Amino acid sequence: MKKVIIFSAPSGSGKTTLVKHSLEAIPELEFSISCTTRQPRGSEIHAVDYHFISPEEFRQKISEDAFVEFEEVYTDKYYGTLKSEVEKIWNLGKVVIFDVDVKGGISLKKYFGDKALSIFIQPPSIEELERRLISRNTDDAETIKTRVEKAGEELSYAKEFDKIVINSDLNEAKKEIEILIKSFIEN
């Protein structure tokens, strides 16, 4: 059966770290590279971390029905999952793993239904989330403020996911994630 694993969380919850760990620990998984119109951050690479495209190109793909799901998170800041990316991974005989925002995660779960395991990574607190965002040193103060405000809203959607993992201890969260994913893949 073709399956997908969906990771969602407020920015700074440790989602990307846990996705990378899952990819290293579970060979059946293959990362789905999302499309975005935002600029690369830090050491991000086109076609590795994201497919970085212009808002015009993104809107063209929307008109072509090329996405499983997409969202305009901020004005002209789109994120989306290409149907071609999912098919490519399934054709390799792998399980797709997504690293998406909360609304994208809910949309993907609705789209894939029982083929999907949706996991919400929750920070231990909003204060800890803000501390993590500041310490990663990739955003200015205004962006961090916006992300923290958005996190409050995103936390209210946690109950719409199949599983909630509270990332207060990274090693414990890694173990919990591995158990959840392996159990889902094997059934």
Image (cartoon, rainbow, N blue to C red):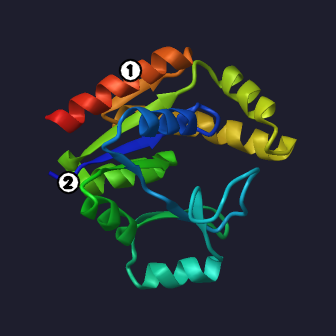
Residue 41 in the image, given as x and y percentages of width and height? 74, 53
Contact, mark 1 vs mark 2 (Cβ under 8 Å):
no
Which quadrant holds residue 26? top left
Residue 72 in the image, given as x and y percentages of width and height? 57, 64
Q: Which residue is mark 2?
A: 2
Q: Which residue is mark 1?
A: 176
Residue farthest along the right direction in this orientation: 141
| Residue 118 seen in this snapshot | yes
Label 1 environment density (alpha carbons within 10 Å; few <14, some 14–19, many ≥20): some
The label shown at residue 127 is: none
Instruction: Identify the residue at horizontal 41%, vertical 19% (top origin).
Output: 175
Amino acid marked by disc 2: Lys
Would you place residue 39 above or below residue 20 in this image? below
Would you place residue 130 above or below residue 76 in this image? above
Instruction: Identify the residue at horizontal 63%, vertical 65% (top origin).
Output: 46
Residue 66 in the image, given as x and y percentages of width and height? 40, 77
Q: Earlier in the sequence, mark 1 or mark 2?
A: 2
